[in-house]
Amino acid sequence: AWVRFAVGVALLFVGADWLARLVGRLAAARGAGWLVAGPVTRAGVGATAVLAVAVTAAVRGSPGVALGTVLGAAVAMIGLGLGLAVVG
């Protein structure tokens, strides 16, 4: 179990580093800075996780969990965005 955990953590770090470098190159090529690229990347990664949970729940016969996951994520993102806008 520990070997799988260690391999998973290592792959997570390698994948995160690869994604950060890729986003940096794409942002530089498009003339956008990290201020734009970072939140867009975070939103994409977050949406992927929500999609994975929703699809898994739907396949396992729990459409309520799938709908709740999608709606909950949307409400959280809107709330966080509005909260940051008010603070900033």
Image: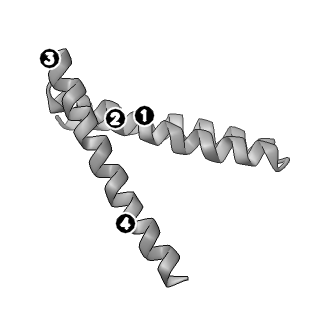
Left/right placement of residue 67 relative to residue 36 reads: right
Cα gap from disc 2 to disc 4, whole angstroms: 21 Å
Labels 2 and 3: the sequence-earlier one: 3
Which residue in the protein does label 1 denote?
44
Looking at the picture, which amino acid does disc 1 mark? Gly
Q: How is the image coloured?
A: one colour
| Residue at image point 42% right, 75% down | 6
Q: Amino acid at mark 4?
A: Ala
Q: Nearer the viewer, mark 2 or mark 4?
A: 4
How crowded is the residue under tag 1: few (<14 C-alpha within 10 Å), some, or many (20+)?
Answer: few
Q: Amino acid at mark 3?
A: Gly
Q: Tell me which label, 2 or 4, sits earlier in the chain.
A: 4
Front-most of 34 and 26?
Answer: 26
Report the residue marked by disc 2.
41
Distance between mark 4 and mark 1 Cα atoms:
22 Å
Residue 12 drawn at (x, y percent): 39, 59
Above or below, 73 relative to 9: above
Where is residue 7 drawn, in percent x and y?
44, 70
Circle 4 residue: 10
Q: Nearer the viewer, mark 4 or mark 1?
A: 4
Residue marked by disc 3: 31
What numbered label is drawn on residue 79?
A: none
Label 1: element kind: helix
Identified at 78% across, 42% down, the residue is 58
Give the alpha-carbon distance from disc 3 to disc 4, as whole Å: 32 Å
